[in-house]
Image: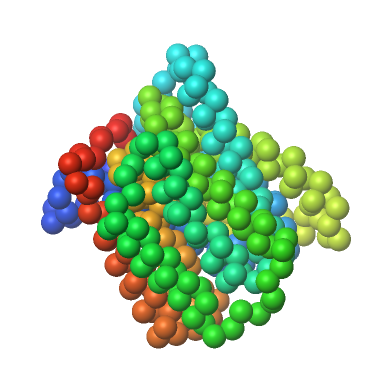
């Protein structure tokens, strides 16, 4: 069995899009953001079927790792021997897996500790952290244009998240800390994967990261599941299994392969801004699937996010984008 959608290459895009590595990276980032944006509505369906957030996070990572493993075993993607990697690359792979596990657990816990809109507003400030880390490491230049792009995109994001007219729960210290941890972990993931383990093809690297993260998350999910009032009630729910399939295949395996390909082509800061398509997608899907309305103010905020993302693509003066393997 083959999975052609997992081996998608930007060469299959319409010919009107410039066939360059940089353009491919832009498309991968936007597509990854849209794919990640399905996770909010899908996770709500799983929770409604009785699944806990740690179990959902662990099942998502496990499903994604299994699907990528199947693709690799089918010979649909190249692989490299991990023994041939440098110690630095192996350490960065492990660090990225830990960051992925901590990201998922912290983010889903934050959703339970504070209003979702407030969590999203804090979490999606991670492009600022990525930009700061990239500049500190000397990888990217934070030009005035990119600062303006970040400001426009984050302002639009705030409008999208908070423009619905109702916040619900009040802000909590625990929620703020958990959302901030999740943002820091996402930034670490993006920065570490920018120039680390570049010899490892995207599908293999993503599969390894998801497998490592899943192992760590099950250490939290199993005790949480067994300690719940009705453990395993979701096992007989078709809705829960459908949510796991979508979250694992689209929201983990496919999305994270695309994200890694994007970061390797356009850099962490630009990829992070482009992936702000995620919350915009989530708000739109919440309106369509969960019956949550989309206000005119939120629509305008979505336009601002996209405008900021496009502005961030302007190259820095006298600097050529570096190409990386797919």
In which quarter of the view is residue 284 placed?
A: bottom left
Please say if 283 is above or below 181.
below
Left or right of 5: which side holds 234? right
Please say if 78 is above or below 302.
above
Left or right of 319: which side holds 59? right
- Give the farthest residue toward the top: 84
- From the viewer's side, name the closer residue of 53 and 133: 133
Applied colour scheme = rainbow
- From the viewer's side, name the closer residue of 302 and 76: 302
Q: Is residue 270 visible?
A: yes
Please say if 34 is above or below 184.
below
Left or right of 141: which side holds 247? right
Can you give x and y, in whole percent of width and height, for residue 67 in the image? 50, 40
Q: Is residue 254 visible?
A: no
Can you give x and y, in whole percent of width and height, for residue 135 in the image? 39, 42
Can you give x and y, in whole percent of width and height, for residue 105 in the image? 66, 50
Is the N terminus in the top left, top right, bottom left or bottom right quadrant? top left
In which quarter of the view is residue 107 placed?
A: bottom right
Give the residue displayed 52% in from the left and 30% down from the top. 93
Give the residue displayed 57% in from the left and 36% down from the top. 97
Number of marks in the image? Answer: 0
Is the C terminus in the top left, top right, bottom left or bottom right quadrant? top left
Give the residue displayed 50% in from the left and 14% down from the top. 83
In which quarter of the view is residue 209 placed?
A: top right
Give the residue displayed 49% in from the left and 54% down from the top. 126
Can you give x and y, in whole percent of width and height, for residue 163 in the image? 49, 81
């Amino acid at each position: 069995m083959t999975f052609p959608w997992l081996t998608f290459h930007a060469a299959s895009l319409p010919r009107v899009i410039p066939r360059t590595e940089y353009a491919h990276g832009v498309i991968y980032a936007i597509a990854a953001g849209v794919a990640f944006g399905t996770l909010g509505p899908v996770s709500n369906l799983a929770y409604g079927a009785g699944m806990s957030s740690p179990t959902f996070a662990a099942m998502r990572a496990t499903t994604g790792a299994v699907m990528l493993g199947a693709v690799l075993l089918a010979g649909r993607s190249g692989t490299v021997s991990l023994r041939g990697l440098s110690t630095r690359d192996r350490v960065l792979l492990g660090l990225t897996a830990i960051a992925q596990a901590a990201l998922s657990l912290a983010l889903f816990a934050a959703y339970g500790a504070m209003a979702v809109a407030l969590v999203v507003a804090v979490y999606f400030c991670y492009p600022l952290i990525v930009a700061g880390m990239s500049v500190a490491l000397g990888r990217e230049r934070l030009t005035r244009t990119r600062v303006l792009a970040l400001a426009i995109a984050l302002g639009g994001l705030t409008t999208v998240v908070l423009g619905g007219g109702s916040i619900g729960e009040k802000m909590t210290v625990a929620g703020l800390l958990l959302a901030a941890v999740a943002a820091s972990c996402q930034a670490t993931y993006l920065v570490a994967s920018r120039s680390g383990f570049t010899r490892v093809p995207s599908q293999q690297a993503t599969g390894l990261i998801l497998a490592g993260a899943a192992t760590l998350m099950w250490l939290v999910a199993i005790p949480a599941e067994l300690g719940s009032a009705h453990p395993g009630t979701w096992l007989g729910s078709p809705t829960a299994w459908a949510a796991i399939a979508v979250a694992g295949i689209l929201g983990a395996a496919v999305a994270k392969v695309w994200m890694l390909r994007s970061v390797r082509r356009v850099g962490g800061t630009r990829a992070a801004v482009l992936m702000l398509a995620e919350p915009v997608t989530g708000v739109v899907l919440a309106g369509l699937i969960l019956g949550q309305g989309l206000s005119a103010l939120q629509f305008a905020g979505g336009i601002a996010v996209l405008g900021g993302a496009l502005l961030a693509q302007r190259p820095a003066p006298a600097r050529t984008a570096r190409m990386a393997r797919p």
